[in-house]
Amino acid sequence: MTHVPPQARPSDGCPVPPFTPVRVRGGHPWLRRLLRHRRRVLAVGLAMTAAALATTAPRDTDRPRGPALAAEESRERAPAETVAAPVRIADAAAAALLRPGDQVDVIAAEGPPGSGARPHVVAAGARVTEVPEQAEGPAESGALVVLSVPRATASRLAGAGASARLAVTLR
Protein backbone atom coordinates (compact mmCIF):
# COMPACT_ATOMS: atom_id res chain seq x y z
CA MET A 1 0.00 0.00 0.00
CA THR A 2 1.24 3.46 -0.81
CA HIS A 3 1.87 5.84 1.94
CA VAL A 4 0.42 9.33 1.49
CA PRO A 5 2.28 12.08 3.31
CA PRO A 6 0.14 13.85 5.88
CA GLN A 7 0.44 17.26 4.18
CA ALA A 8 -1.11 15.99 0.85
CA ARG A 9 -4.33 14.55 2.23
CA PRO A 10 -7.38 15.89 0.35
CA SER A 11 -9.47 15.84 3.52
CA ASP A 12 -7.30 18.60 4.94
CA GLY A 13 -8.32 21.02 2.14
CA CYS A 14 -4.96 20.82 0.55
CA PRO A 15 -4.88 22.42 -2.93
CA VAL A 16 -4.28 20.20 -5.92
CA PRO A 17 -1.19 21.23 -7.87
CA PRO A 18 -1.82 22.38 -11.47
CA PHE A 19 -1.17 19.87 -14.22
CA THR A 20 -1.84 19.59 -17.94
CA PRO A 21 -4.96 17.67 -18.95
CA VAL A 22 -4.52 14.07 -19.91
CA ARG A 23 -5.26 13.49 -23.63
CA VAL A 24 -5.73 10.06 -25.13
CA ARG A 25 -3.82 9.76 -28.38
CA GLY A 26 -4.20 7.24 -31.10
CA GLY A 27 -7.48 5.83 -32.36
CA HIS A 28 -8.54 6.22 -35.94
CA PRO A 29 -8.85 9.83 -37.07
CA TRP A 30 -10.30 8.77 -40.42
CA LEU A 31 -13.17 7.04 -38.63
CA ARG A 32 -13.96 10.21 -36.71
CA ARG A 33 -13.87 12.19 -39.94
CA LEU A 34 -16.25 9.70 -41.60
CA LEU A 35 -18.70 10.05 -38.77
CA ARG A 36 -18.64 13.84 -39.08
CA HIS A 37 -19.24 13.82 -42.85
CA ARG A 38 -21.80 11.02 -43.18
CA ARG A 39 -23.82 12.59 -45.99
CA ARG A 40 -20.80 13.21 -48.15
CA VAL A 41 -19.56 9.66 -47.61
CA LEU A 42 -22.99 8.25 -48.48
CA ALA A 43 -23.14 10.32 -51.69
CA VAL A 44 -19.65 9.20 -52.72
CA GLY A 45 -20.54 5.57 -52.01
CA LEU A 46 -23.72 5.77 -54.10
CA ALA A 47 -21.85 7.45 -56.96
CA MET A 48 -19.21 4.72 -56.91
CA THR A 49 -21.87 2.01 -56.92
CA ALA A 50 -23.68 3.64 -59.85
CA ALA A 51 -20.45 3.94 -61.81
CA ALA A 52 -19.60 0.30 -61.16
CA LEU A 53 -23.06 -0.83 -62.27
CA ALA A 54 -22.93 1.32 -65.40
CA THR A 55 -19.59 -0.10 -66.49
CA THR A 56 -20.50 -3.73 -65.84
CA ALA A 57 -24.01 -3.68 -67.38
CA PRO A 58 -24.47 -5.75 -70.56
CA ARG A 59 -24.52 -3.63 -73.68
CA ASP A 60 -26.85 -3.93 -76.64
CA THR A 61 -24.60 -3.47 -79.64
CA ASP A 62 -27.46 -3.46 -82.15
CA ARG A 63 -29.38 -0.62 -80.45
CA PRO A 64 -28.48 3.01 -81.14
CA ARG A 65 -27.11 5.11 -78.29
CA GLY A 66 -27.31 8.79 -77.40
CA PRO A 67 -29.57 11.19 -79.34
CA ALA A 68 -30.49 8.51 -81.89
CA LEU A 69 -31.85 6.35 -79.07
CA ALA A 70 -33.91 9.23 -77.66
CA ALA A 71 -35.42 9.97 -81.10
CA GLU A 72 -36.27 6.30 -81.63
CA GLU A 73 -37.93 6.00 -78.21
CA SER A 74 -40.00 9.15 -78.74
CA ARG A 75 -41.27 7.73 -82.04
CA GLU A 76 -42.21 4.48 -80.32
CA ARG A 77 -44.09 6.29 -77.55
CA ALA A 78 -45.98 8.69 -79.81
CA PRO A 79 -49.54 8.81 -78.48
CA ALA A 80 -52.19 7.41 -80.77
CA GLU A 81 -54.74 9.89 -82.06
CA THR A 82 -57.93 9.46 -80.08
CA VAL A 83 -61.42 9.97 -81.46
CA ALA A 84 -64.88 10.00 -79.91
CA ALA A 85 -66.72 6.80 -80.84
CA PRO A 86 -70.45 6.41 -80.14
CA VAL A 87 -71.22 2.85 -79.04
CA ARG A 88 -74.62 1.26 -78.39
CA ILE A 89 -74.43 -0.93 -75.29
CA ALA A 90 -76.97 -3.77 -75.17
CA ASP A 91 -77.77 -3.35 -71.46
CA ALA A 92 -79.23 0.11 -70.78
CA ALA A 93 -79.02 -0.39 -67.01
CA ALA A 94 -75.28 -1.07 -67.21
CA ALA A 95 -74.79 2.05 -69.32
CA ALA A 96 -76.70 4.09 -66.72
CA LEU A 97 -73.94 3.25 -64.18
CA LEU A 98 -71.27 4.90 -66.31
CA ARG A 99 -69.98 8.42 -65.68
CA PRO A 100 -67.67 10.57 -67.84
CA GLY A 101 -64.05 9.74 -67.01
CA ASP A 102 -64.69 6.05 -66.23
CA GLN A 103 -62.45 3.47 -67.90
CA VAL A 104 -64.21 0.50 -69.45
CA ASP A 105 -63.54 -2.59 -71.50
CA VAL A 106 -65.97 -3.18 -74.38
CA ILE A 107 -66.87 -6.82 -74.96
CA ALA A 108 -68.61 -8.18 -78.07
CA ALA A 109 -70.73 -11.35 -78.05
CA GLU A 110 -71.48 -12.74 -81.51
CA GLY A 111 -74.86 -14.30 -82.25
CA PRO A 112 -78.04 -14.36 -80.17
CA PRO A 113 -77.85 -14.65 -76.37
CA GLY A 114 -77.48 -18.22 -75.18
CA SER A 115 -76.03 -19.46 -78.48
CA GLY A 116 -72.72 -20.35 -76.83
CA ALA A 117 -70.70 -17.87 -78.88
CA ARG A 118 -67.46 -16.90 -77.23
CA PRO A 119 -67.21 -13.19 -76.24
CA HIS A 120 -64.08 -11.19 -76.99
CA VAL A 121 -62.70 -7.81 -75.92
CA VAL A 122 -62.99 -5.20 -78.66
CA ALA A 123 -61.60 -2.19 -76.74
CA ALA A 124 -59.59 -2.31 -73.52
CA GLY A 125 -59.21 0.74 -71.28
CA ALA A 126 -61.55 3.04 -73.25
CA ARG A 127 -62.42 6.28 -71.47
CA VAL A 128 -66.08 7.29 -71.22
CA THR A 129 -66.51 10.77 -72.67
CA GLU A 130 -70.26 11.19 -72.44
CA VAL A 131 -73.37 9.23 -71.48
CA PRO A 132 -76.30 10.91 -73.29
CA GLU A 133 -79.76 10.77 -71.73
CA GLN A 134 -81.65 7.73 -72.94
CA ALA A 135 -84.45 8.60 -75.35
CA GLU A 136 -87.96 7.36 -74.75
CA GLY A 137 -88.32 3.97 -76.35
CA PRO A 138 -87.89 0.28 -75.76
CA ALA A 139 -85.18 -0.72 -73.30
CA GLU A 140 -84.17 -3.63 -75.57
CA SER A 141 -82.45 -1.23 -77.96
CA GLY A 142 -79.77 -0.52 -75.32
CA ALA A 143 -78.12 2.80 -74.51
CA LEU A 144 -75.67 5.05 -76.26
CA VAL A 145 -72.24 5.74 -74.73
CA VAL A 146 -69.51 7.94 -76.24
CA LEU A 147 -65.99 6.55 -75.72
CA SER A 148 -62.58 8.13 -76.35
CA VAL A 149 -60.46 5.52 -78.16
CA PRO A 150 -57.66 5.37 -80.74
CA ARG A 151 -58.80 5.57 -84.38
CA ALA A 152 -58.06 1.88 -85.09
CA THR A 153 -60.10 0.80 -82.05
CA ALA A 154 -62.98 3.04 -83.13
CA SER A 155 -63.22 1.19 -86.46
CA ARG A 156 -63.21 -2.18 -84.64
CA LEU A 157 -65.98 -0.91 -82.33
CA ALA A 158 -68.09 0.19 -85.30
CA GLY A 159 -67.68 -3.18 -86.98
CA ALA A 160 -68.43 -5.13 -83.81
CA GLY A 161 -71.46 -2.95 -83.04
CA ALA A 162 -72.97 -3.81 -86.41
CA SER A 163 -72.64 -7.57 -86.01
CA ALA A 164 -72.65 -8.28 -82.25
CA ARG A 165 -74.16 -7.22 -78.96
CA LEU A 166 -71.78 -5.01 -76.98
CA ALA A 167 -71.34 -4.92 -73.21
CA VAL A 168 -69.01 -2.93 -70.93
CA THR A 169 -67.07 -3.79 -67.81
CA LEU A 170 -65.78 -1.11 -65.46
CA ARG A 171 -62.07 -1.06 -64.65
Image: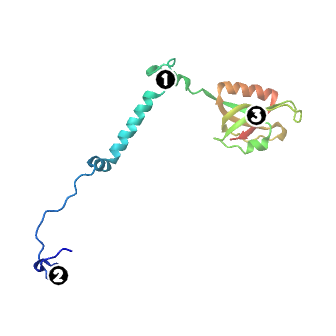
Marks 1 and 3, the one that precedes in the sequence: 1
Q: Which residue is mark 2?
A: 11
Q: Which residue is mark 1?
A: 59
**Badge 1: how crowded within 10 Å, few (<14), some, or many (20+)?**
few
Q: Residue furthest right?
A: 115
Q: Which residue is mark 3?
A: 107
* Viewer-nearest of discs 2 and 1: 2
Quadrant, the N terminus: bottom left
Marks 2 and 3, the one that precedes in the sequence: 2
Cα distance between the residues tagged 2 and 1 = 81 Å
* Viewer-nearest of discs 1 and 3: 1
Cα distance between the residues tagged 1 and 3 = 42 Å
The amino acid at mark 2 is: Ser
**x%, y% of residue 136?**
80, 41
Q: In percent of the image, x 74 and y 38: which residue is there?
A: 168
**Badge 3: how crowded within 10 Å, few (<14), some, or many (20+)?**
many
